Amino acid sequence: MVKKLALLFSVLLFIGSLFFFAQDTGGGGTAQSLTAGSLAGEVGQAKTLYKRLAKTLDASGVRLCFRGEELACDRESGVFYLPVDMDGTQWESGSFTDAGGELQILPLEDYTLLDKQETVASGRQVLFLAWSEERSACAEVKVVFTGLPVVRIETDADLDVDTVFAGSISFYQACGLEDWVFSSAFEAHERGQTTRAYPKKGYRVNLITVTSTGVVNKNKESVLGMRNSDSWIFYAIYSDGTKVRDKFNTELWNRFGAENTPYDAHFGTHMEYAELIVNGEYRGLYGVMEPIDSSQLGITDEEYLYKRTYGRELSTELFDGAKPEDYLTVLGMEIKGKSGSGTAADWECLRSFIEMTEQDDDTFAQQAAQLLDMDNMTDIWLYLQMLYGEDNIYKNMFFAFKKTQAGYRLYLVPWDMDLSWGNIYVDDREQLYVTNAPERASDYLEWPLADRLLALDAGGIREKAAERWEELRAGVLSEESMEELLEECIHQVQDSGAFSRDAQRWPDSSHDGDYAGLRRFLSERMDFLDKMIQQ
């Protein structure tokens, strides 16, 4: 009860700030572009003022706005962050102002004469002048034009201490877009397993609204171009030195596995990069992700969704010897979309799957063809073989049981795919629990469930796998297609300037940028699978 009251107090404390955000959106249309040299007059005026005015203005009190939106600022460095279209060559037009209205803002250098893409990629700090005629004082203000969205969080919590917190959140997209800023109140908590040991934390952020009487409601909105949802995952991307594995793998699965179902639902997630600033402190590069939940998969009240969170043995003996509230500890499984741990009846679908795996070969093959969606099973086997995703076999997998006229049908959905393409788990905190094993490129990834299906050719899965692989290699998994996707992921983290900023903020995390090693593993792995599947 105390924790709930604290959260409510935090939300009410910060809800007022949202009214400011709503007053002047400045988003009446898409911004026009600036022509080169168009700021020469303003720059001249700023330089004259800089010479005349005292340099006594407190820059920490400046609240810089662009097109009416107050920008996120790292107060220690005094740098404001403005997201722009990093693929365009022309600068977005718009006025820089002070949120308090007491100061005036002018550029100290004509950034329209700078190469936009190089300015963004290098993280160059562009100088502006904040000045007050009344006080005859001025100060320099620094702006970084980033190629990624920015997320700003304000809370009374200390994120280095508090694991549950609330406040206000704003998502900033490229400033040339219409309605480029979205703001909401939120509640949040830390998330992750191994990653909780890292100083850079991951979060689950739940968007909310609060009525005048203090009633908290969910606030489902589209964020960064993704689906409507009130819940969002902030993935810290700490241990992957390339910062692209999860994004790359998510997009790969989306291109063939996530949509290969008979349902009008996305059996996967989407992820967009963003830079996070909390209480005036730059927190680095994050992946903002859609949660895989009942809404995402179209799970009805009569259907069931489980997540394999920990690597535990699945057996009917262990299942029957425990209660639903103990299944996370005993089986490493949790249920989604139900109240608490659910009832015993809510777990019957999972039990039917476990029982099937314990049958003799003939019964197993027959039941598997009925329970498993073989198209999905083929896709997930090919996908994990391709990534060498051993971390997703015994955990980081969702089990979605969809109801059909013939009974329930099981679909597997992958999650958290950073340990891939040669990166594997190692029980060593000093190595961030990750090591690179390039020799795995030519190893078969053992998966007892899939291996047994293949050995027995349950549901004709061997022919399905061979035909599906041939189809994919001629399309979305061709060398050209995969290289184009990988290059785009690298482009986003590197040419936005975010990779170097994240490395500076978190020097103890991994930032090896070993894209050559990733490409080498990818090439060798695909060659290995081509030969293996032909055989």
Image (spheres, helix red, strand yellow):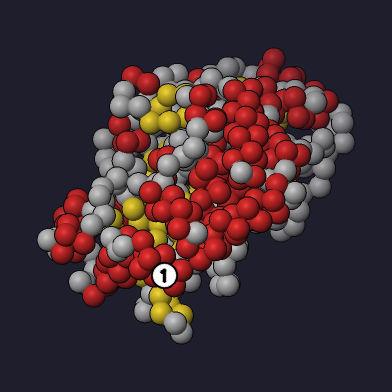
Q: Is residue 85 above or below residue 30?
A: above
Could you tell me which residue is drawn at 33 percent across and 19 percent down?
Answer: 430
**Toward the viewer: 330 or 360?**
360
**Toward the viewer: 150 or 67?**
150
Q: Is residue 341 left or right of residue 14?
A: left
In which quadrant of the rendered view does residue 53 lie?
top right
Percent across and percent down for residue 352 are: 30, 69
In which quadrant of the rendered view does residue 52 lie?
top right
Under mark 1, the amino acid is: Gln
In which quadrant of the rendered view does residue 138 lie?
top right
Q: Quadrant of the C terminus?
A: top right
Could you tell me which residue is drawn at 71 percent across and 58 percent down?
Answer: 28
**Toward the viewer: 316 or 415?**
316
Q: Give the residue number, with chain letter if any, for mark 1.
A: 366
Q: Secondary structure at mark 1?
A: helix
Q: Residues within 10 Å of mark 1 (few under 14, many from 20)?
A: some
Percent across and percent down for residue 491 are: 68, 33
Query: Residue lying farthest bottom?
Result: 405
Q: Is residue 129 left or right of residue 75?
A: right
Q: Is residue 371 above or below residue 272?
A: below
Query: Residue lying farthest left?
Result: 321
Could you tell me which residue is drawn at 30 percent across and 31 percent down?
Answer: 197
Percent across and percent down for residue 411 are: 46, 64
Q: Is residue 403 above or below residue 487?
A: below
